[in-house]
Every structure is written in structure tokens, then in C-alpha cells.
Amino acid sequence: MLIVRRRAFARPHRSLATFANGCPAVATYSLAPDGSFVPHGIHVLEIRGGLIARIVVFLDGGLFPRFGLPTSLPGSGSGAQR
């Protein structure tokens, strides 16, 4: 059995639910040096039989406005977060 001991996200992230081409999707934001959260990627979920069959990821923060998503999210307080 393979056990991965590396974090998928090395920095804190936030996410917002959205839709892409009629599929559920998750927009992720990563922590910026100023403590805000900036666009990271959009993860589109393909659902079959009530289960996730495939995830397609677009790592292009420039796509966020096309989805009506904010171009940044506020941090909680000032400075970097844990």
C-alpha cells in the first residue's frame, strides 16, 4: 500500500462552490503574502451514478471572472495565516 506523506496544498486554501458546463465545480484560492486569498484553480466534478467519476482541473486564475467568481477573498485578520 502506498502512503503519501506530502500535503496536497502546502499553503492554506479556501474554496467556493460553483458550476462549469452544468457540472458541479470548486474554485480554490491560495494564500497570498498579504494575507488575502488569490485564485488558484477550478476543479470540475463529473458525476455518474451519484459518485465522482472524474475531476478536471483548470489551474488558470484568469478564468475566475468568466465564472462570476471574485478575484480575491479576504483573509481573517491581517498578515499571513497558518
Image (tube, rainbow, N blue to C red):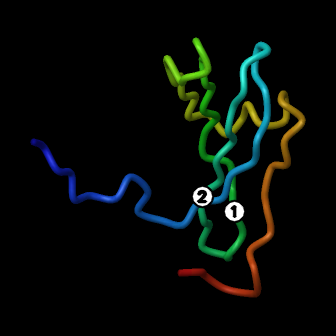
Q: Which mark is residue 30?
A: 2
Which residue is nearer to you in this view: 16 or 41?
16
- Identified by mark 2, the residue type is Ser
Question: Can you tell which quarter of the image residue 57 is in?
Answer: top right
Element at badge 2? strand
- What percent of the width, then of the height, locates residue 59? 56, 34
Q: Residue at position x 72%, y 35% from top?
A: 62
Quarter containing the N terminus? top left
Tell me if mark 2 has few (under 14), some (14-19) or many (20+) residues whose alpha carbon lies within 10 angstroms of its own. Answer: many
Direction from residue 39 to residue 1 in the image, left or right: left
The residue identified by callout 1 is: 37
Q: Residue furthest bottom?
A: 78
Q: Seen from this angle, which residue lies furthest front?
A: 49
- Helix, strand or loop for disc 1: strand
Q: Taking 62 as reference, is 74 left or right? A: right
Q: Residue sitting at 62 percent across and 66 percent down?
A: 32
Residue 38 on image: x %, y %: 69, 56
